Image: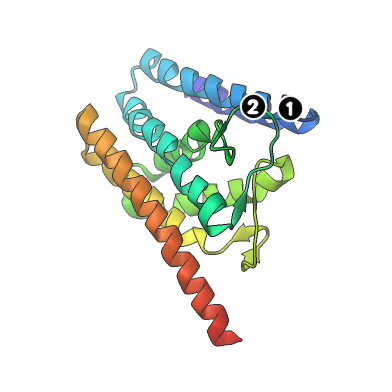
Amino acid sequence: MPALVAVHVGFAVLAGAAYLVEPPARGWLVLLAVVAYGVALPLVARAAGRADWLRLWAVLAPLSVLQVLPDWALVEVAGTLAFPDLGGPRVGDAVPLAMAGMWVPPLFVALLAARGSAWRAAVAAVVVLGGAEVLAPVLGLWEPTGDLTEVAGVALYVLPAEALLGAAACLVVVHARDLRARLAGAAAVALLYTGALVVGLLLLDRARLVVA
């Protein structure tokens, strides 16, 4: 467990250090933090003989890559999210490549705390990812845009989607036993998350019209 804590502390230190430098170095430092975490986590899990940590990583790594797609859709289609160009490669000139690994750390922490319970994973995902949403604008990584209802900088429509993301990812970790099942499960979770975001946007928009 100390090694696992060290991996997360190291990631936090590198990501936090990005705040101290200017673009384009900031974007490259964030990418370095994500890559270092993605390499260190499975190595630590294997060295510690923790098959449960490896199962988490085996699902969350492909899921994080696929999460670039809903982020891209929010930028290009919905117009509710923006990723400032801080340096480093980008996907479709819209989403930093670092986001392909950025989902692993918060989801790993949330699912580890959930201990196999989908309900606990839903709650933990909202807490951990909601915290990330608060911190991200401070680092300039991303920010909600458009006419949205926000609390402490968090767009409210993402919260139900993040709860579903945590619960669904937990179910895949628990039930997927081979590589094909994990990849299929990760794809299904990313699509579920995308759909939940769209529904959340729709309901929020309808609610604003009713109140108005």
Residue 36 locus on image (x, y percent):
55, 19
For the point 39% across and 50% down, the residue is 165
- Above/below status of 23 relative to 188: above
Colour scheme employed for the rendering of this structure: rainbow
Badge 2 amino acid = Gly
What element does badge 2 sit on? loop
Q: Nearer the viewer, residue 129 or 200?
A: 200
Q: Which residue is mark 1?
A: 24
Badge 1 amino acid = Pro
192 left or right, relative to 21: left
For the point 44% across and 17% down, the residue is 44
Q: Residues within 10 Å of mark 1 (few under 14, many from 20)?
A: few
- Above/below status of 15 relative to 134: above
Report which quarter residue 155 is drawn in: bottom right
Q: Which residue is mark 2?
A: 88
**Nearest to N terminus: mark 2 or mark 1:** 1
